[in-house]
Amino acid sequence: MKTATLFEKKENKQSTSSYLEIDLDDLEFYKKFEHGAEFLNFPSKKISNKTLMEWFSVNEISFWWFIAPIIHPRYKEAILFIDRLSNFLEQNSIKKLELHGCYDKIDLVKQICEQKNIKLKLISKNNFRFQIKKFAKTQVKKSFYKKISKQKLDKRMKCYEPYRTKQIPKGQILITSPGIYRRSTICNDGNICNQEFFIQPILDGFKNKYSILNVDLDYTFKGTTDVLAERLNSEFDWIPVDYFLSTKQSSYVDDSIKVLNENFKSLQKNDLTNLFTYNGISLWDFLKKTFNDIFLEPNLPTYLHLIDQLIIFFKSSKPSLIIQVYETGPYAKAFEIAAKKLGIKTIGIQHGLFPSDFPDYMCKQVKNNEFEFGNVLSDYTFVFGEYYTNLLTKKGGYPKNSVISTGNLSVNNVDIIKQNFSRDVLLKKNQIPDKKIILVPLSFRLKYHQNNPDQLILNKIYSHFKNSETIILVRPHPGDLLDQQNFNELFPVSNFILSKNTISEDLFLCDLVIVPPISTIGSEAALYEKPTILVNVVDNDMSSYDDVYQQIVKHDVARFSSLDNLISNIESIKKGELWKTNESEKRKIFLSMFFTKGEKIDLLKIIEDILN
């Protein structure tokens, strides 16, 4: 009988013909990353003749669309775990599994083993400790979350306090943007500075023509003030979203929360084990805790409070137009709901590449006559190119006349940047020798999530290039707290360098880009004509990847590679090699289709036409 033991994390694992030790890092090899297309069907699932959209509705608004971004990461974690563990057990003919970790997934493991007729043994001593800690955390979670939320609000309002005497402009245009979208970039004068991704062209174009009020959104749990302080000190008018949340919660909000809570209690009286399932495995036990958390701060109580206060604010200072980056986020959704209540026009701006199973955008249940409690969308959505227009209107539920191709607003000056950059200057700035440079932009936050495709790719590259002259330039994911010390511990060699550049500098400087089929940079590299390799860390099968990644390869702007063939693919690309657009009709079509490249887009006129 072949036995395996599953750990959360373990070094120096044993492996014999009859016994295997494995951890979550190893399981990454058994299934590629995906968002889970089945999640898109959940809003329409019926329980006692009511859909999930209806169960989570109050005052004619379905709050399913607010909680979905909280539930989805947990759902995604579950389905990837199920597929990976199932594939591992099958491929290695495991007949007995010992669980020495991953105790939060015990119910999933039990069902998988029952389904495959595999004997399961729990290491009860460790499991008991885990369950005690889990119970203790649950008991204090409500008060802890409330305390953290209060500390976050106080911290951010203290940052805003010196500006509070400044009169808030009654703006014709209101713009919201999360702090993560203020980044180091190339300014109009050619120098490096911190600016706004996506909305900077709008701010620059309209600053002398319209009154603009900007709102800083902070989706971090404990709250940050660095970006807020920068924005408050900029030439533009900013306020934190906390400004609206600093007032006392009304009885109307309290009553609405009670209704939603009672609805959820009634929902749970039904058998939900068959509602949330994946490949015959019930996910309900795994998801139940997250559903309970949505009633805690800073989730539903905050969102309802924000809607209430925004309606009051908009009544006294009604903007003509609201523009939002990451308009699918719950804070932004609150602005959208309030705007709809008062007939204010809204625009959403695409903030990155997305595949057809990405629930932030690919909702099928859009609020209309068919779906009374469907998702409330922006009146207009600006997307990078025609490809995304077709994706949203043909596969998603977006109305045809609501989606406009404007190009990627964060790279609208790419041609000017390319003309002004000097490789020699950038090499000197980074203290890098003039050698072949491989750029690895991280799609995940390596500081917190080390069992992911990025880590597997970096490990492969490190094992081959750690003693070579080739430079490996690693670009952290936005918001990651990965610092030089942490990075040096992971990759203690001089040719592995943690980037502190702008994305434009990194793309200009490198000779090729290595990413899993997840990252937006996998398509943006084509704007710089840089060879790109999309790496499948699981197997050699590229056909199962979403069409958005297939198009990148079909149009000669990237190659697929397995992890096994990665090194040979890297070595096949020479230093200084470019995949030039003018040498490939396919690449021209791709840039037009994905980024509206080559077309004259008057962004400000489009917005003014909507405004008027």
Image (spheres, rainbow, N blue to C red):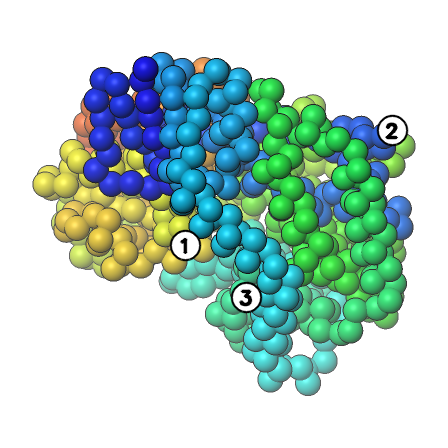
Distance (Cα) linking label 1 and label 2: 44 Å
Label 3's element?
Answer: loop
Q: Earlier in the sequence, mark 3 or mark 1?
A: 3
Find residue 224 and report its horizontal and vertical position in percent. 52, 67
Q: What secondary structure is found at the residue carrying circle 1? A: loop
Q: Upstream in the sequence, badge 3 or badge 2?
A: 2
Q: In this view, does 447 lie to the left or right of 46?
A: left
Distance from disc 3 to disc 2, alpha carbons, whole Å, reads 40 Å
Going 24% across and 49% down the picture, which residue do you hit?
Answer: 490
Residue 328 visible here: no
Residue in the picture at 29% in, 30% down: 21
Q: How many tags in the picture?
A: 3
Q: In this view, does 312 lie to the left or right of 335?
A: right
Q: Do the residues labelled 3 and 2 touch (CB within 8 Å)?
A: no
User: With 504 as the anchor, is 109 left or right in this view?
Assistant: right
**Label 1: which residue?**
480
Kindly report the distance in space between the C-alpha atoms of the residues bearing marks 3 and 1: 14 Å
**Image location (x, y in percent) of residue 80:** 49, 30
Q: Residue beneath label 3, please?
A: 223
The quadrant of the picture occupied by the N terminus is: top left
Residue at image location 21% in from the left, 22% down from the top: 16
Residue type, label 3: Gly
Query: Which mark is in front, 1 or 2?
Result: 2
| Dots 3, 1 in contact, CB < 8 A | no
